[in-house]
Image (cartoon, grey):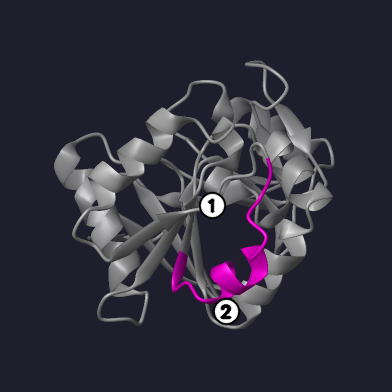
Amino acid sequence: MRIIGLGGGGYTDEQQKKLRDYVVDHSRADRPKLCFVPTAVGDQTEGIVRFYEQWHGHGELAHVKFFPYPPPDLRDFVLAQDVLVVSGGNTANLLAIWRVHGFDAIVREAWEQGVLLTGGSAGMICWYEACVTDSFGPQLDGLRDGLGFLAGSACPHYDGEERRRPVYTRLVAEGFPAGIAADDGVALRYEGTELAEVATVRAGATAYRVDADGETPLAATPI
């Protein structure tokens, strides 16, 4: 059971590539089957095309769409993948669509069978019990009904969007579940449900444990 959550993409093409290479290196496959899940952006064609452009050469590429409806062989197809790459976008909408089609259960089964789950922003925070999200507007809100594969809460873009840090720390201080925040360009690699490594493609960028007493920076490995 493995998850690599990305607090946000790198700021340069080189940094983005390093993050993709990091994911592929942990796929445990020589030529991994990589499946893009763009639900959080409404299956936008532009996002799908960008995935194929950016991940070209990293493995065998595919994608899953839910509009106008998911494919009939959805479960078998997903369980045959090595990596699911979940897009950023609207986390609340992603969760609602996945649940109405039973995809949340399929993804959990895939995770339990060894498929690596990854993604940035919404593709990072959806795996936790709770998160800080802009799903309901730019003011940011707490969402408490995440998939719950990982305990606690999460916040992406911690140093990339000015409201993320103050909103997250305030929510946690007021009783929101404690958790972890990740700067842009930072990868959180979980083995099972335990954080195994914080990795970064940006000097000075890292992750933080956030609880009611404040935040604690975590050591990050450069990649």
Q: Position of residue 94 (x, y in %)?
A: 68, 41
Q: Could you tell me which residue is drawn at 17 percent across and 39 percent down?
A: 13
Residue, disc 2: 1
Is residue 20 visible in the rendered image? The answer is yes
- Reply yes or no: does residue 128 show up in magenta: no
Could you tell whether 5 is left or right of 151 in the image?
left
Residue 190 appears at what percent x and percent y?
52, 71
**For the residues carrying marks 1 and 2, which lies nearer the camera in this image?**
1
Q: Residue furthest left?
A: 14
Q: Secondary structure at mark 2?
A: loop
- Is residue 72 depicted above or below 134 in this figure? below
Q: Which residues are magenta?
A: 69-83
- Closer-to-camera residue (178/102): 102
Name the amino acid, label 1: Val
- Compared to residue 195, the image places residue 163 above or below, namely above
Quadrant in the picture for residue 21: bottom left
Q: How many marks?
A: 2
Which image quadrant: the N terminus? bottom right
In the picture of the structure, the residue carrying the numbered disc 1 is 64
Q: Quadrant of residue 133?
A: top right
Q: Quadrant of residue 160?
A: top left
Please, what is the three-letter code of the amino acid marked with disc 2? Met
Q: Secondary structure at mark 1?
A: loop
